[in-house]
Amino acid sequence: GEVVAAGAACVGARVGDRVVPNRSYVDGTWRRDIVSACENFDVIDRDVPVHAAATLTVNPCTALRLLEDYDAREGETVVINAATSGVGRALLQIARTRGIRTIAMCRPREDARETEEVFESLRADGADVVLPDVEGKILRLDARTRELASRARVAYNAVGGYSAQTMLRLLQPNAGSRMVTYGGMSKQPLLVPTGAFIFKDITLSGFWLTRWLEHDATHNSSRGRRAMLDEICALIRSGALVVDAARFRDVPLARLQSTLALDAAAPDRPGLH
């Protein structure tokens, strides 16, 4: 949003500044206008495209935290499922800037041509290898994938179920490997083979951005959040992190209810703004 008026006590934001909410669940975001306390917003660069700004505080922030907080290192490989999600695409692009290799898992589409187009778009975002994420299919790895997997210590799971089991098979044994779960799109529980613990010594953990932000606000006066937004804005300005505007539709608020109903029924839903 844009600041159109600011009280005398407002510090850090001026009329004309572009801002994003940092307490979106308090005031809500589906609105044209809002009167709220200055500290509920962070100022961002005006040259950040509007569609990138609309998702700035969730998807790229989650991707950045996953890479930074779980010791993803230059030259090593990370594995990610739900690779076409907002977090997935942001993570692939940010990983590329850090010299981190990526194995991206993606659900094939019904049509082979469409599947290849999606896979190619993931490669364009930085994926070194794209694997079809299909339940019940035997995982066969070519030489390039095996080489990348030999350096895989961290996996980021947003699906659960069979997909998570596949990720565990790609992680290296006895190397401090970890699978971080930050979503559950399949609505299936994690079924972890006993061998992943005994023979591979893999650690399972979870990440929730809201918890990270609360901890940062309590123990760091939200300085981490501010630095995180600055870094993401710099990546966007440099062209290293791109949000594809074609994946979004601009919808007037007056049509919100009907559009949400249509959007929920769509097989591959674009974002709404």
Image (cartoon, rainbow, N blue to C red):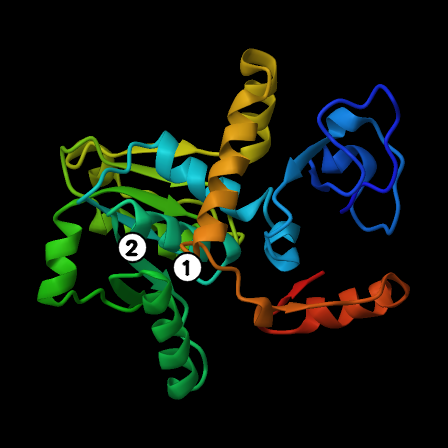
Point 63% across, 40% down: residue: 44
Q: Position of residue 1 (x, y in %)?
A: 76, 47
Point 20% across, 39% down: residue: 195
Q: Disc 1 on helix, strand or loop? A: loop
Left or right: residue 16 compared with residue 244: right
User: How far apart in space, not on screen, are marks 1 and 2 (Cα)?
Assistant: 14 Å
Nearer the viewer's eye, disc 1 or disc 2?
1
Q: Position of residue 122 (x, y in %)?
A: 37, 66
How crowded pointer 1 is (Cα within 10 Å; few <14, some 14-19, many 20+) is rated as: many
What mark, if any, has residue 166 been given in the picture?
Answer: 2
- Going by the numbered disc 1, the residue's amino acid type is Ala
What mark, if any, has residue 83 been given in the picture?
Answer: 1
In the figure, residue 39 lies in which quadrant?
Answer: top right
Q: Disc 2 on helix, strand or loop? A: helix
What mark, if any, has residue 131 been given in the picture?
Answer: none
Q: Position of residue 181 (x, y in %)?
A: 43, 41
Q: Position of residue 227 (x, y in %)?
A: 50, 29
Visible in this render: residue 191? Answer: no
Left or right: residue 247 compared with residue 179: right
In the figure, residue 69 lies in which quadrant?
Answer: top left
Where does the C terminus fall, quadrant-wise? bottom right
Front residue of this view, candidates 9 and 156: 9
Front residue of this view, candidates 1 and 183: 1
How crowded pointer 2 is (Cα within 10 Å; few <14, some 14-19, many 20+) is rated as: some
Point 25% across, 64% down: residue: 129
Left or right: residue 139 compared with residue 158: left
